[in-house]
Image: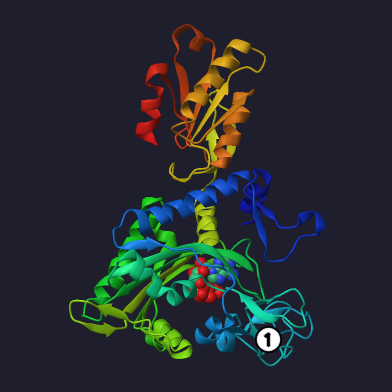
Amino acid sequence: MEEIAALAKRRGFIFQSSEIYGGLNGFWDYGPLGAVLKRNVKDAWWRDTVELRDDVVGFDSSIIMHPSIWKASGHVDAFHDVMIDCRVCKHRFRLDHVADRSQCPDCGSKDSLTEPRNFNLMMRTSIGPMEDTSSTAYLRPETAQGIFVNFKNIYQTARKRPPFGVAQIGKSFRNEITPGNFTFRQREFEQAELEYFVPDDGNDMNAFQEWVDRRKAWYASYGIKPERLRFYELAQGERPHYAKAGIDVEYLFPWGWGELESIAHRGTYDLDAHMKLSGKDLRFFDEAAKQHYTPLLIESSAGMDRTVLTFLVDAYERERSVDPNGKETERGVLRFSPRIAPVQVAVFSLARNKPELVERAAGIEAALRASFRTQYDEGNIGQLYRRQDEIGTPFCVTVDYESLDDGSVTVRERDSMRQQRVAGAGLEAFLRERL
Ligand code: ATP
């Protein structure tokens, strides 16, 4: 993990937030490559969840909403972690992370742990110019509630009837007591949530299973190693009392299994809670049957930062190989799926100081830019390959002296490191087929 975090910093994927002021625990910034990677991951989720379906619409609600929303959802009263502290080393642990309460898991001291205490995880702010007269509000700890309270607005304006879904990607905030494991547990993070409303007609568990299968296929289509991904089925005692089914999608990180996403059958719990507190009717009106009913809810809630981290960890490899001169070398490589790689094609000029080569290579890069995510570079080819391997670029194109004679270029493939000569006229088609 340290190696990956170091690479992420060195190559411009992820930086610690507020670094020049000593950093801020639980907050991270995405650098030039990380911002593209994260955007690609979010776009991939949005494409599969919204654009490729005719029964899901998009949504974008505000981060700060009426405080009553968090009362209705249960977050004001129940959204807390139970924590215990070690009196000796002062470390704080989540109660459910401590197997043996007679001994500190960190310093090993006997009987040093305090009694469990509650910590509310919601971040507070205040609305209005004067803190003493303003009212307390919360930064949302999840995006889903914005969808629930707008349920009627959405189905009426989108002219949808259950089964249909509403999807949203956006920032969420939690005052996590123990942020850590790089970007796995943050205090500000991004979620991608799908709320899929179904009629209570006996097909609800099929809808649940369809979303589980769809999410499985999504991870697989981006090449996540199947042996490092599991869909853990929650037993009755492990899920909330109102949930009919629940699955945690987990990835095997270097420190163990960690949750990426949770898929749950939540019944009518969320809409019921808002109807009760607001006194407003959020039921769906079935024109044909001329009756109101509250749809059941299937939810998929995925963390985009954890998904980005998964793509980084899963793609990373340190590989030994023998170069053409018989010398043993080692390289770090990110084997990103070409669809999410921040750079898809890098184009190099073999020499920096040869204007014909530079011009030709820059021209090729500019022409490919309309079709792919590209980058131009020049200089020592070995070093350029190493850099592109480390940022996960699937193809490198090199312009050399031969290119000036016949227009051909060398294309080098990241994973096999195989190089081949490709005619200039056929280059775009060659890359398109492989990307
Ligand atoms: P955990 O048990 O790890 O705290 P959770 O069960 O509270 O997670 P959910 O409330 O189900 O998480 O949120 C849905 C998703 O949002 C999670 O699967 C995760 O990917 C993401 N997520 C939740 N908390 C964080 C966080 N602090 N940092 C980054 N992502 C998070």
Q: Where is residue 152? Give x, y as percent.
A: 38, 75
Q: Looking at mark 1, is its residue's CB closer than 8 Å to ligand 1?
A: no
Q: Quadrant of residue 247?
A: bottom left
Please name the residue shown 31% across and 64% down the image. 213
Please name the residue shown 55% across and 84% down the image. 68
**Placement of 303 over or under 82, stated as above or below:** above
The residue that label 1 is drawn on is 84
* Element type at mark 1: strand
The answer to whether residue 247 of the structure is visible from this angle is no
Q: Nearer the viewer, residue 369 or 184?
A: 369
Q: Quadrant of the C terminus?
A: top left
Q: Residue furthest left?
A: 288
The answer to whether residue 82 of the structure is visible from this angle is yes
Q: Where is residue 387? Give x, y as percent.
A: 60, 35
Q: Quadrant of the N terminus?
A: bottom right
Q: Where is residue 31? Give x, y as percent.
A: 64, 48
Amino acid type assigned to the residue bearing label 1 in the image: Ile
Q: Residue furthest right?
A: 21
Please name the residue shown 70% across and 83% down the image. 104
**Placement of 196 over or under 76, stated as above or below:** above
Q: Quadrant of residue 329?
A: top right
Q: Where is residue 45? Give x, y as percent.
A: 42, 56
- Please state if 386 lies on the left or on the right of 297 as rendered: right
Q: Residue furthest bottom?
A: 115
Q: Nearer the viewer, residue 416 or 349?
A: 349
What's the colour scheme?
A: rainbow
**Placement of 155 over or under 266, stated as above or below:** above
The 10 Å Cα crowd at callout 1, few under 14, some 14 to 19, many 20 or more, is many
